[in-house]
Image: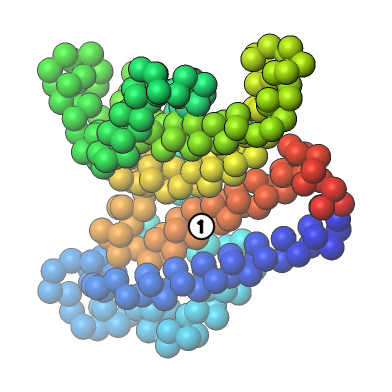
Amino acid sequence: MKALLLKKVGTFFIFLWAAASLIFFLVHTIPGDPVVSMLGKMPRSEDVLRLQRALKLDRPLAEQYVHFIKKLLFLDLGESIIDRKPVVSAIMKYFPNTAILTFAAMTLAGLIAFPLGILAAFKKNSIWYALSMIFSAIGLAIPGFLLGILLIILFSVQLKFLPISGSGGFEFLILPAATLAISLSAFLTRMIHTAVAGELSQPYVLLAQSKGLSEFHIFSRHVLKNAMIPIIIIMGLQLGALLSGTIVIESVFSWPGIGTLLITAIRQRDFPMIQGVALFLAALYLLLNLMVDLSYPFINPRIRYDYF
């Protein structure tokens, strides 16, 4: 078990290093000079050179990369070149809002997807199955940003029930969370239906029925436990994707989360902030994948035998 754990943790750090390297070099392909952006239009060349030296942007790219990796070893993401504040403090300021939005969207998506997916699996060729598949198809077809705009037009502009954008009370959370939840639940509904329907077709279900066990008992004690393996995998992966997907939705609703921080940093050519936020999201995604991977043996005893 220890060897397996070390292997998976080692793989995590290898992928994290690869992600950090890719992010560093991609960020430096962004057109525009952050120093020029800071100094305004028509800056003097001596001012540009002086600021580049102060920010260490005049050094060769390879030297900047080595310096970047060394700082990462001490969990130092650097300082913003705009306000000279630590990148970590900015991330910690904005990330709680993203976490709240993500948790709300995932909870709402689960409340929608589980009943629809399970009903579709049990009531095949019924109106429930048709409605579930129609909802799934429509939800997957509409882009998140377009769905957000449509919800704003309906609930904010026309009905005037909810605020258009910003943050504050619970009412500001409803529309962005619903936008993310609808797109996610459309995907999860189809995955849950497939997983449950696949288990319902297994021979052990027929055997349990022949013993006179109720459908609820068969589902709760056997079918759901086995179906949860692929469902948990999908939800774990989708949670990481959801954290990244909030970037667009936060922009649509002006939600002050980490996506807004990233978009602002890109506009300002704030390289350390872009690198820090992108790497933080990548590390979070990889960490969630690792946690899902390590949770398998605690969910299914058959997998536990292979692990131990």
Tell me if 113 is positioned left or right of 209 in this view: left
Q: State the image quarter where residue 4 is shown.
A: bottom right
Query: Considering only vertical position in the picture, is 208 above or below 233?
Result: above
Residue at 74% across, 37% down: 299
Say whether residue 192 is visible.
Answer: no
Residue at 23% across, 72% down: 32
Say whether residue 50 is visible.
Answer: yes
Residue linked to disc 1:
282
Tell me if 278 is positioned left or right of 178 in this view: right
Disc 1 crowd rating (10 Å Cα; few below 14, some 14-19, many 20+) is many
Q: State the image quarter where residue 222 is shown.
A: top right
Query: Considering only vertical position in the picture, is 98 above or below 73?
Result: above
Tell me if 13 is positioned left or right of 35 in this view: right
Where residue 21 appears, x then y in whole percent? 50, 73
Where residue 230 appears, x then y in whole percent? 60, 41
Q: State the image quarter where residue 248 is shown.
A: top left
Instruction: Give the image's coloring scheme.
Output: rainbow
Where residue 160 appears, x then y in whole percent? 18, 15
Amino acid marked by disc 1: Ala
- Of residue 212 and residue 161, the one placed in the foreground of this image is 212
- Of residue 7 and residue 185, the one placed in the foreground of this image is 185
